[in-house]
Image: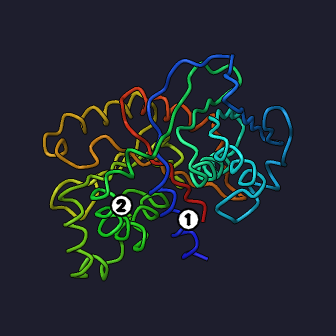
Amino acid sequence: MFPNKLLFLFITLLLLAACNKEKDSNSFKSSEIVLEVNSENFALNGKVIGNTLEDIFQIDDILIAPLDDEFQKVRENNVKLRIRFSEDVYYSVFDKILRTAVHNSIQPVRYTIGSNSSNVYTFDIREKLRNVEWKDEWANFCFVTLFEKKELISVLEFGNSDYFSNQKLMNDTTYRSSKLKCTQNYMNLSVLFPVTNSDSKYRVVFYETDSILPKVYDLKNEADLLNVLETVRKNENLQNKKDYDWVNIFVRDSMDKVMTLNRVEPLIKIMANLGYRMLFTDGGF
């Protein structure tokens, strides 16, 4: 089952990017359609087209079939899409909906989180996909190294002292060479939601040049997170990285352990305010 999840993560990393926020407006142009998603159902322009739990959360497919059909019509008619998520929607539902929109070349997509939210977040992958060199290098050196070897997964799952217990991997010449080539150009800044450490709200991970071991910070609140991100921004050795303004949002979501958007949205807001472009990743395996 893991290879399918690896593909799942790969597609998500290469396709999903979120940008800055803007003020919402209750009036929508006729050239826009509105998708409303809550924990029970999802509706397009007021018409319910599916059950959130059965048609999205419980399925293993990358694309959501009922939405895929509707989004094809949106693309053909060149209509803009606005999505309103309720705060109790699971993160994996959010992730699958965004990927289904991207699959149908619907960009940009604007979305809100929470019924009373005045913040509209926007994602648009066109700028990212134009940077072919960045995308190819990431796929060849950084992504494969990190996910094929389950490196970020280990950082997510275990405590600070436990994520590199595989000495054989550490001594692997091919692994070390690929990893060093990656860290010369990319810091792979990631914000994770720890699974085992209940005292930490966030875990920040990034790589410095010429090191195969990540810097890891367990943080209790948003103030601590801002302090670490400020330190990263001021680090001259990181300012020339090709992914300097990118951050991975890494969330684990599964049938027995779910993350709702009310927990993720504060992080999205912080990153948008700081000018980061976000890559959403679902680690539900």
Q: Quadrant of the N terminus?
A: bottom right
Q: Which mark is residue 95?
A: none
266 left or right of 168?
A: right
| Frontmost residue, 252 versus 59 | 59
Amino acid on which disc 1 is placed: Phe
User: Residue 76: horizontal and vertical position, in percent?
Assistant: 66, 47
Q: CA distance from mark 2 to mark 1?
A: 28 Å
Image quarter in which the C terminus is found = bottom right
Q: Which residue is mark 2?
A: 161
Q: Which mark is residue 8?
A: 1
Residue 67: give x, y in percent of width and height: 74, 50
Q: How many marks?
A: 2
Q: Residue furthest front?
A: 77
Residue 212 placement (x, y as % from top left): 23, 65
- Left/right placement of residue 223 relative to residue 93 reads left
Q: What residue is rendered at 74% in x and 38% in y?
A: 37
Left or right: 170, with 115 as reference point: left
Determine whether 188 is above or below 220 in the image.
below
Mark 2 neighbour density, 10 Å: few (under 14) some (14–19) many (20 or more): few
Give the mark nearest the N terminus, 2 or 1: 1
Say which element carries label 2: loop
The relative height of residue 126 versus residue 47 in the rendered view (above or below) is below
Q: Select label 2 or label 1 by which is in front.
A: 1
Amino acid, disc 2: Ser
Within the image, what quadrant is residue 270 found in?
top left
